Image: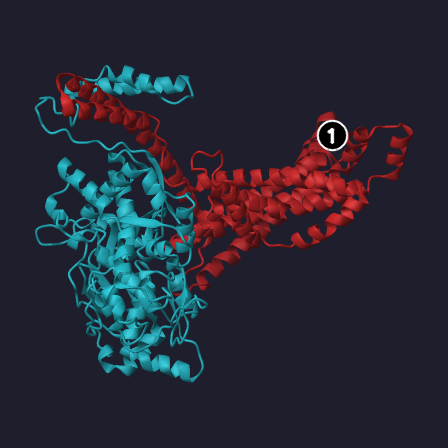
Chain colours: A cyan, B red
Amino acid sequence: MRRYLIANLCCVGLVAFAIGCSSSEITLEDLEKAAAKVDVARLEGVDASGADAEVVEILDVEKPNLKFGFIKLTDCAPLVIAKEKGYFSDEGLNVEIEAQSNWKVLLDRVIDGQLDGAHMLAGQPIGATIGFGTQAHIITAYSLDYNGNGITVSNEIWSQMQENDPKLKSPTPQHPISADSLKPIVDSYKQEGKDFNMGMVFPVSTHNYEIRYWLAAAGIHPGMYSEENIQGTIDADVLLSVTPPPQMPGTLEAGTILGYCVGEPWNQQAVVKGIGVPVTTNYDIWKNNPEKVFGVTKQWNDEYPNTHVAVVKALIRAGKWLDETDADGNLVNRQEAAKLLSNKDYVGADEDVIDNSMTGTFVFQESDVRPMPDFNVFFKYYASYPHYSDCVWFLTQMRRWGQITEEKPASWYAEKAKDIYQPAIYRKAADMLISEGKASPNDFPGPDYDGYREPTTDFIDGKSYDAKKPIEYLNSFEIGNKDPEPLAKQ
Amino acid sequence: MNWRGNALKFCNVAGLPIVEPFIRLAAGEDVKEQFKSISKFILLPIAAIATFLFLWNAAAKTVVTDSMKLPSPSETWSAGTELFAMHQAQRAADKEQKQEKITEAIQLIAKANYLTAQAESADGERQEKLLANALVLKKKAVQAANYRPSSAPTFVDQIFTSLKTVFVGFVIATLIAVPIGVLCGMNPWCNAALTPFIQVFKPVSPLAWLPLAFLIIVWAYSGTKPGETFFEKAFLISAVTVSLCSLWPTLVNTTLGVASVDKDYMNVARVLKLSWSQQLFKIILPASLPLMFAGLRISLGVGWMVLIAADMLAQNPGLGKFVWDEFQNGSSQTYARIAFSVIIIGVIGLLLDRVMIFLRNLVSFGNPQAA
């Protein structure tokens, strides 16, 4: 072993000397010369026996130097971990990940090619592909996580909610907390002619649909979109406005908004700094709901198909690492993840704010700390697989609130989901990882899986969602657009 | 006398009145007079800075909200030193990584050679697969050997990016503003035609220009892939925004400088029957240089200010992005780092200004102005 090391070091010196002499790039010949001195049999990963083991395909990566964008939120973790833990470089990828100032800038830069791909709101590829906002065909082959958002209200609104519902006064009130106790407050604002403002992060964000879901489940109208009104404020009891995630606590403190829906660490930041109280999380609104995806343009994928597979391979390994548990089911790597994420070039918030939610607990108030092992799910429950049914849910919400202005048949929902979600790429990456021994077949849905998760009733309003029946789901809501039944059969 | 005279002249041209009393002291001039200068140019500013720091420190104790806190001078200082330490650490890590990559490259080549050797003894599909893999490994090896660090730019990197951007923007602005300014100064008809544009576009804020600069750059670069072009899009958007905002002072001052060239000079030129280009290069341009440089100095100052704003808004690389990213971080260090960046931005602005004063005084033909 020692002899091998020395030989290697000599080679490094040799090559370094070659670079020193000429400013030009190192060529294959330089490397061949240096490598001629390495004892091949001792190399790690080389099967020296030369047995008839099956030859594993090595991906020919078209574009090794990549730049991905992200927004400062803990659910960008798979990207950060894949970089920091060397999963990208294992695939021969040299990845830079760059913080973006808001979701719009991020999307625009992916579309015009300044970024190769990005940590995106699950609604962004869908909105862009169907042409709400900026039109561009964006696809996803990797879902970054489930859950991870919360709804926070200001201290003042929280104490009024407690007045309206004495049960909330307990130091550990019962969850989930619905918006029922918020309704009288909103009504009194309306009576006085004052606007009740709340924040979400982007028109097609999960947050927008979640806060709308939560409000509407209690009979509070969050406003509709139409072709003319793209603010989504038609008939609104609560005016929802766009605020970039990191600015949420500050805007709440300034009194511009009275509550918001955002991802971590910006709910925990409000708790730690004492400026607001998270009332519910999206885990309570819909258990294991899709949240962020890794998005690239269709054109990029067509140009660099192997690169895309390599990226997804690295992300799968990162997701697996994040959700690793010990024998007792405790998440073992999350503290390290929180530490990595607190680096100023990533999320940048203090480690103790980030680890609040990352390590499987969620602090609602100082007295109310709930264990929530599934607050952030990155891999468990096949969370990283791009399920068509997740895409269809977003489409139903876009139709429900009028972002999709026309009635569409059920078949349209399924078609769009197939346009945007690309499980085939995920499958290829997963199969390669399995054959390399880095993942097991149990990590992924079986080969006969059609991409539709089981129908579920795990919603705060108890509604049942079957992605194969989008129109029926749409028509089950009291508030929002309803479509004629015949469309369901088409 | 000569070293004294030269040194004093240098101080004057470089705009460094602070050094002057020391030179005079060394030359043995009236001590009392010089101490008066020293106390005016050195002791008084020091006292003022001390007072400022004291007030800042006091403010840092009072300006505290639930989520934010004004950093004290000492916190700001330690945040700054930490930023530089982080830069050093990053550089060291990058270097180490590069070494590792070279080792990896050699291993990959060796593996590729091994696979090729194996392929010789194999046949059919297996041989094909092995050869394909060996090719890919070789490609990977070359990539690894020519690895460029992909770590996020540090504070120091951002300073250099900003300087580069402002310089490119300033050069573009100068190349546009000086010829047009000369044209307007020489020809009143031309001046009358362009005045409405100058008047309307001069007061426009950088933030309004930015989307248009974005549009133009994206258009100009459509059909190219990132990495293939000489400049990055984001970099050019910043630079173009800087030029759009900073070309006006140069333009206006050049026009004024050219228009107000002494009539006697022009009459002499006519008597000497100088050609048009001789008039331009021998008389008009030299005579209007001081005003032109006064304009360039204001332009550079405006450009630096605009650059920080453009970085912040458009996510372009540079100090503005650094400040914005820090603001988004919301960590306990955030505001100290921002305060430190503010000071660094100011100091760099000051240095740029000094350089321009120096250049202007160089062309002022013995009539230097201190500031």
Q: Is residue B166 above or below residue A145?
A: above
Find residue B210 and report its horizontal and vertical position in percent.
54, 50
Crowdedness of circle 1 by 10 Å Cα count: few (<14), some, many (20+)? Answer: few
Check disc 1 and give the amino acid type. Gly
Foreground of the two, A446 or A116: A446
Q: Quadrant of the C terminus of chain A?
A: bottom left
- Specify the quadrant of the image occupied by residue B81: top left
**Residue A211 seen in this snapshot:** yes
Left or right for B222, reference A342: right
Q: Residue at x 49, y 33 (%)?
A: B230
- Specify the quadrant of the image occupied by residue A272: bottom left
Q: Quadrant of the N terminus of chain A?
A: top left
Find residue B45 and report its horizontal and vertical position in percent.
61, 48
Find residue B232 and report its horizontal and vertical position in percent.
47, 39
Chain ID at mark 1: B
Under tag 1, what secondary structure? helix
Q: Which residue is mark 1?
A: B5
